[in-house]
Amino acid sequence: MSKIKEAFANGKAFVAFVTCGDPSLDTTEQLVYAMEEAGADLIELGIPFSDPTAEGVVIQSANERALAGGVTTDKIFDMVEKMSPNVKIPMVFMTYANVLFTYGTERFVKRAKEVGMSGVILPDIPFEEKEEFASVCAAYDLDFVSLIAPTSHDRIAMIAKEASGFVYCVSSLGVTGVRSNIATNIGEMVDLVKANTDVPCAIGFGISTPEQAKNMSEYADGVIVGSAIVKLCEQYKEDCVPYVKEYVASMKAAIK
Amino acid sequence: MPSCKLEDTMKKGRFGVHGGQYIPETLMNTIIELEEAYEHYKNDPEFQAELTTLLNDYAGRPSRLYYAKRMTENLGGAKIYLKREDLNHTGAHKINNVLGQVLLAKKMGKTRVIAETGAGQHGVATATAAALMDMECEIFMGKEDTERQALNVYRMRLLGSKVNEVTSGTATLKDAVSETMREWTKRMDDTHYVLGSVMGPHPFPTMVRDFQAVISKEIKEQVLEAEGKLPDAVLACVGGGSNAIGAFYNFIEDEGVRLIGCEAAGRGVDTAETAATIATGTLGIFHGMKAYFCQDEYGQIAPVYSISAGLDYPGIGPEHADLYDKGRAEYVPVTDDEAVEAFEYLSKMEGIIPAIESAHAVAHAMKIAKDMGKDQIMVINISGRGDKDCAQIARYRGEDIHE
């Protein structure tokens, strides 16, 4: 069983996202330890990109802060290399295609595997363009995570059949960010995924409260939370670790 | 020179290695719907007839090909013709693409259009077509550009559009594109994104090129009529590259015609304040396409600069990237200083105030005309008019005028 699949093996999974280097890479490392302790089952490490077109303002600003602070892909690899022996749960990178492509996709994927990562999520790579990245990930035994959206309809079966790691089920239209209301018919989307693959399915985009997490987790194998965590990092900066830990614990408790 | 047959470049929205559809899954069905609609309507005689009527009766096509006699004599080399896209309704080539896309959107049953704009020309053109075809319209424009081009902001509002100031990133054209893409992922059922250049995911680079190709179709007919032969060189400014591809397209297979794209070098290609993508960029993936981009070694997109808000973009369209790879077109950098000089030169020499974007092409023409023979013909695409730039150029020269 892949490390990612294991993360979904013990009840509903809580997937936590942080932007690397916001406010500093040391804090990111401490956040990962704290989130694991608080019950997170999988960590998404965001590699900042200058122009994150799928992100709302919260994660956009985090990317800007991290880059202004001098974070680079190499520094992130070094941080992960140091941290990963202490982390039992799987970690995946979430970033944009250009970050891999410009680094050299194979060089990036090889290094990601070496430092202990389990997968990669690229929100600007749809099914039609995935081969160029997914084939390299497969060669280095890294899961290339596919996304499905409320607009995917007839595309879901095709995407699910080739899914690896988990299926990232985008809850609503638009970009990442906290939402008070998620109107999409999630159940229908997840059913279509389930009919075509046994890869687990996690729902993300817009989830911030324990109630939303509990509600969403009833449809899928896990929930993904990003902006709500990044907001705490923005608010409390270097002191954010205990706040994030407490928040993750409350979210995990809600979906148990 | 390797062959450059057009059908090679048409496979799955690829131009050599460039192009593609690098966009979030949320937009894929919308893009596929657009691709199918475009494939249908581009071969629909009724659609084409309607578009031609709009281009001719509303936008004022065909635009004139004007023999610039004084400029020719002054520079003492090639015979210079100016393709007067500046005379189109709304003052630039942008209207060609916009009329096509808004008409297509209307046929698709969309009721709302959104668009990015840099200098404001594409925003004004989109707002105009939206008014004409009774569509709701929202324009996204970098905050810095709304200040550089305040008059165009007013024009868009006057035409009934909402103008959203974009404050993210560098608050210029690339951020306006990003923000319009974000808006489209929120609302696509009733909304079409009228992309303003030959960039973004397939089918935009092909579709926008087809709508702009009318420029080179006319140049070819007009120059053949005037001179009985093809031009030796066609020059155009390049940001994303829509007026340039429009001016080049029907000459691509005529290998004797030099195609020269003039990029905005800003304060120089050896400085960080430049937007010259071919001169300083590398292969990357951004804004839905694989092409050349100004970026650092980690793929972070560079905060580019040019005096021209319309060329202030860190990438170049995939077909240009491919024409460059194949050696079919040349791309040269032109600085702010050179462009401003050309802006003033054409105004005084021919009584034509070009857009500061187009002045980049004029500037390069001034450099190379004298090295060409008197029997050689050069066509410069004057992609837009310069009224919008007067206040800014005055400031550049240390004069403060009120708009």
Image: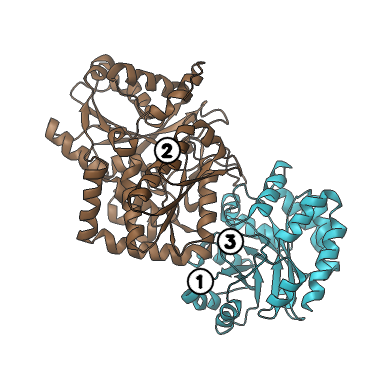
Chain colours: A cyan, B brown
Distance of label 3 from label 2 (alpha carbons): 36 Å
Query: Looking at numbered disc 1 in the image, what kind of residue is underneath it?
Result: Ser
| Residue B240 visible somewhere in the drawing | no
Residue A144 falls in image quadrant: bottom right
- Compared to residue B345, the image places residue B39 above or below, namely below
Distance of label 1 from label 3 (alpha carbons): 14 Å
Horizontal arrangement in the rendering, residue A108 relative to residue B202 (left or right): right
Q: Which residue is mark 3?
A: A123
- Compared to residue B356, the image places residue B208 above or below, namely below
Label 1 crowding class (10 Å Cα cut-off): few <14, some 14-19, many 20+?
some
Q: Chain of mark 3?
A: A
Q: Chain of mark 2?
A: B
Task: Report the residue that reaches farthest toward the bottom.
Answer: A195
Mark on residue B155? 2
Q: Which residue is mark 1?
A: A152
Dot 3 falls on a residue whose secondary structure is loop
- Compared to residue B132, the image places residue B275 above or below, namely above
Mark on residue B19? none
Contact, mark 1 vs mark 2 (Cβ under 8 Å): no
Query: Looking at numbered disc 2 in the image, what kind of residue is underneath it?
Result: Arg
